[in-house]
Image (cartoon, rainbow, N blue to C red):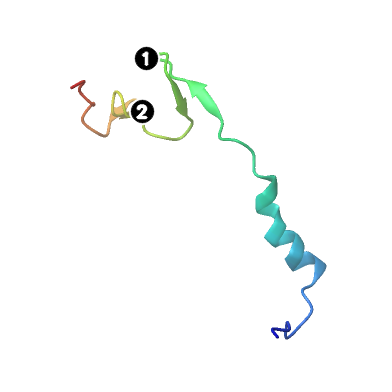
Amino acid sequence: MAVPKRKVSPSRRGMRRSADALKQPHYIEDKDTGELRRSHHIDLKTGMYKGRAVLKPKTEV
């Protein structure tokens, strides 16, 4: 039977459980297109990030 070598401290246990309190991702309205996107992420529709073209914009098929 598996037995832990050492007791897990309350601090380490809390650090492990901290991911349980993560919130849903926050979306903002893009100033140019008006679409919702995550902050600090590239807008995939236009390919822009911080006012610069980073990717080629997606074209509708």
Q: Residues within 10 Å of mark 1 (few under 14, many from 20)?
A: few
Write down the quadrant of residue 12 in the picture. bottom right
Residue position for label 1? 33
Marks 2 and 1, how far apart at CA = 9 Å
Q: What x and y, as percent, mark residue 60? A: 21, 20
Q: What x and y, as percent, mark residue 40? A: 46, 35
Q: Amino acid at mark 1?
A: Thr
Compared to 2, does 38 lie above or below? above
Residue position for label 2? 43
Write down the quadrant of residue 25 in the picture. top right
Check the picture and name the quadrant holding the N terminus.
bottom right
Compared to 4, does 46 lie above or below? above
SS label for mark 2: loop
Q: Amino acid at mark 2?
A: Asp
Q: Earlier in the sequence, mark 2 or mark 1?
A: 1
Q: Is residue 15 left or right of residue 42?
A: right
Q: Is residue 32 left or right of residue 23?
A: left
Tell me the residue at 73%/82% (across/down). Answer: 4
